[in-house]
Amino acid sequence: MSGVLAGRRVLISAGPTYEDIDPVRFLGNRSSGKMGFALAAAAVGRGASVVLVAGPTALVTPGRVRRIDVRSAAQMREAVLSALPADIYLGAAAVADYTPRVTAGEKIKKSGEGMVLELVPTADILAEVAAHPQRPGLVVGFAAETGNLEHYARGKLEAKRLDMIAANLVGVPGSGFESDHNALSVYWQDGQRQLGPTAKTRLAGELLDLVAERLS
Ligand code: C5P
């Protein structure tokens, strides 16, 4: 296979995670998985062999992509770490930051009183991949923010020891979660680039070309 990522192994996480409260309820988020799936298709198109770890989404698997379906943050962590080694990790999933301390075995009945749900933090998959003995050559994170894009994105780049972070504004029409379009501000240690606004499929290609550039 030819292309800027020929012979490279690319591991991608995509979509939301669902944290079960009981057999019928869960905590989720508004990630559609579209960006991660578009990245998988674009990576295959550039010659990479691609493993896509996907949270719950109805999206169709792009051709020649090996897809592993998961539900919770804990399952996503397990699947991602088991899929190492890789040359590139793209952490595009919106992983839950908190999960219920216990998942009830039976449907929780309403009592007429208020109720408190106890949550505990999940593991940070991206930070673990970046600190892993089999750390990929390039570890890329995503940051969805409602403001102060560069400040928060560079903070995460540093704190999680990433090589690159792609940040986007959420809460603005025509961008971010659920949309087919997006714009990304990409930051690395000594540089930055603005991509889009454009279709997520096209944005994915532009981001991967940048990733390939940084890898070489
Ligand atoms: O800190 P924040 O959650 O905004 O960072 C977003 C980045 O971290 C995304 O790339 C996301 O996939 C990753 N992440 C993760 N595991 C978590 C939380 C976030 O891999 N538990």
Image: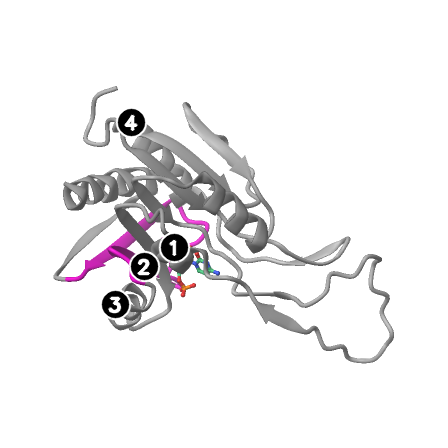
Residue 25, position as x, y percentages in the image: 72, 57
> Residue 197 or 152: which is nearer the viewer?
152
Left/right placement of residue 109 relative to residue 153 reads right
Given the image, on which type of amino acid does mark 3 rest? Arg
Of labels 1 and 3, earlier in sequence is 3
Identify residue for label 2: 168
Instruction: Please state the extent of the stretch shown in magenta in the rendering.
Output: 161-189
Residue under numbered circle 1: 176
Residue 107 x/y as whole percent: 83, 59
Disc 4/disc 2 C-alpha distance (Å): 24 Å
Q: Secondary structure at mark 4?
A: helix
Q: Residue at x 36, y 51 (%)?
A: 133
For residue 154, the mark is 3
Q: CA distance from mark 1 to mark 3?
A: 19 Å
Q: Is residue 204 above or below residue 124?
A: above
Which quadrant holds the N terminus? top left
